[in-house]
Image: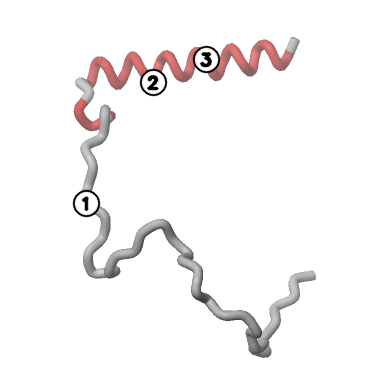
Amino acid sequence: MLYYNVFSMPHSHTHDHPHHAHSHDPATPHPAQAAPWSILRMTVAARLAAALAVSAVLWAVVLVAMR
């Protein structure tokens, strides 16, 4: 059973310690960082090869688990 406290409890301590290592305004989020690789930049052949490789690995896991 989940219990949610709906009554506010008064705090007796002060909050003089920082909660985050840094702070910024929500209107100014972190700048975008370049991804080291992206599946969107891969060719169709490379995507197909990667999908086949992942599929082969997953089938190998299934076959080993069935032994």
Say which residue appears at 65% left-offset and 12% top-offset: 63
Amino acid of disc 2: Ala
Give percent across and percent down for residue 10: 65, 89
| Gap between marks 1 and 3 measured at Cα | 36 Å
Residue 5: mark: none
The secondary structure type at the circle numbered 2 is helix
Counting residues from the N terminus, which is met first, the one under dot 2 or under dot 3? Answer: 2
- The answer to whether residue 33 is left or right of residue 6 is left
Give percent across and percent down for residue 15: 53, 76
Q: Is residue 27 above or below residue 52?
A: below
Counting residues from the N terminus, which is met first, the one under dot 1 or under dot 2? Answer: 1
Say which residue appears at 29% left-offset and 69% top-offset: 26
Q: Are marks 1 and 3 in contact (CB under 8 Å)?
A: no
Can you identify the residue that label 2 sits on?
A: 51
Q: Is residue 16 above or below residue 6?
A: above
Say which residue appears at 45% left-offset and 19% top-offset: 54
Q: Nearer the viewer, mark 1 or mark 3?
A: 1
Q: Are marks 2 and 3 in contact (CB under 8 Å)?
A: no
Quadrant for residue 60, please give it: top right
Can you identify the residue that label 1 sits on?
A: 31
- The answer to whether residue 35 is left or right of residue 20 is left
Mark 1 burial class by Cα count in 10 Å: few <14, some 14-19, many 20+: few
Amino acid of disc 1: Pro
